Image (tube, rainbow, N blue to C red):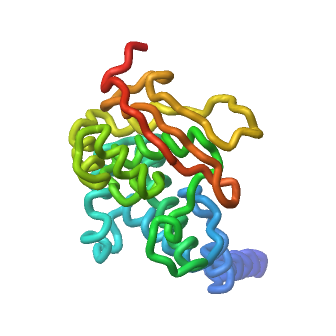
Amino acid sequence: MRKVMLVAAAIIALCAACTSPNLTTASSTTAPSTYQLIEAQSPACAAQGQTVARYLDTGQPTSLDPTYGNQRQDVLALTGEQRALKIRQEADQVIQGCDKGTETGGGTYHANKILTTQPYEAVRAVYETIGQDQPDQACGRFDTATQDTFARDVGYPDCRQAVLGLHSQVTNVNDYAESIFPEQYDPNATTIAIDSCDFTISGGPALGVFTVTKVEKGQWLITAHATGPRTCSR
């Protein structure tokens, strides 16, 4: 009988340890993020990105409905890897804009958007942001003069209207976003011409020929544009 009582006491003590507040706190604070977002320069920006990713995934907190409701609807239309990719892309953009704004406090695209350090990514980002109906992000990939050139080349009065109009012609956002992919280039080059029709453009219209130029901090900015066929023959 005494042996049974000792075993019971040991079991009770073990269960009490399992529900110890200290152990519960430790496990909750070390849980890894499941969204695999880019590394933020500022902890506040990291938190902001995580909050947006969580909202796009779960719809909570609902206070973000007015700001990110449309993106949330886009996420709900996707499944699996495509859904996860969309969440990461949107949250990563939030982190990038937040970090750059924290550094500079500026108001133009030079101050508030981080340009890519890869030339082909500069053009791919235009396709992506047009597909996602993000005029500020898309136009921010061009210098000011080329925003107007691009708009005229595709038949619109300004860059914002061009993005909105082209977005309405996109039939598959994910295919369109991934139409342009990295290719080898001279690492010493400072200007590269990227023809949309060198790629298979699917899910929307081809956007012509872009000239990208290497600028400050190794970033690539679109500095010229030329017309091209809306449908490529590849």
Task: Tell me the residue at 45%/32% (across/down).
Answer: 209
- The residue nearer to you, when weighing 205 against 56, is 205
Task: Tell me the residue at 60%/46% (across/down).
Answer: 213
Residue 61 lies, with reference to residue 213, above or below; the image says below
Q: Position of residue 159 (x, y in %)?
A: 31, 52
> Is 125 on the left-hand or right-hand side of 27?
left
> Is 155 on the left-hand or right-hand side of 135?
left
> Is 27 on the left-hand or right-hand side of 163?
right
Could you say which quadrant of the image residue 205 lies in?
Answer: top left
- The residue nearer to you, when weighing 46 against 103, is 103
- The residue nearer to you, when weighing 90 against 137, is 137
Residue 73 lies, with reference to residue 28, above or below; the image says above
**In which quadrant will I find the C terminus?**
top left
**In which quadrant will I find the N terminus?**
bottom right
Residue 143 lies, with reference to residue 54, above or below; the image says above
Q: Position of residue 202 (x, y in %)?
A: 37, 26
- Asked if one can make out residue 15 in the rendered structure from this viewpoint, the answer is no
Task: Tell me the residue at 34%/70% (across/down).
Answer: 60
Q: Position of residue 59 (x, y in %)?
A: 32, 64
> Is 192 on the left-hand or right-hand side of 228?
right
Residue farthest along the bottom direction in this orientation = 21
Q: Position of residue 199 (x, y in %)?
A: 48, 23
Residue farthest along the top direction in this orientation = 233
Task: Tell me the residue at 53%/39% (across/down).
Answer: 211
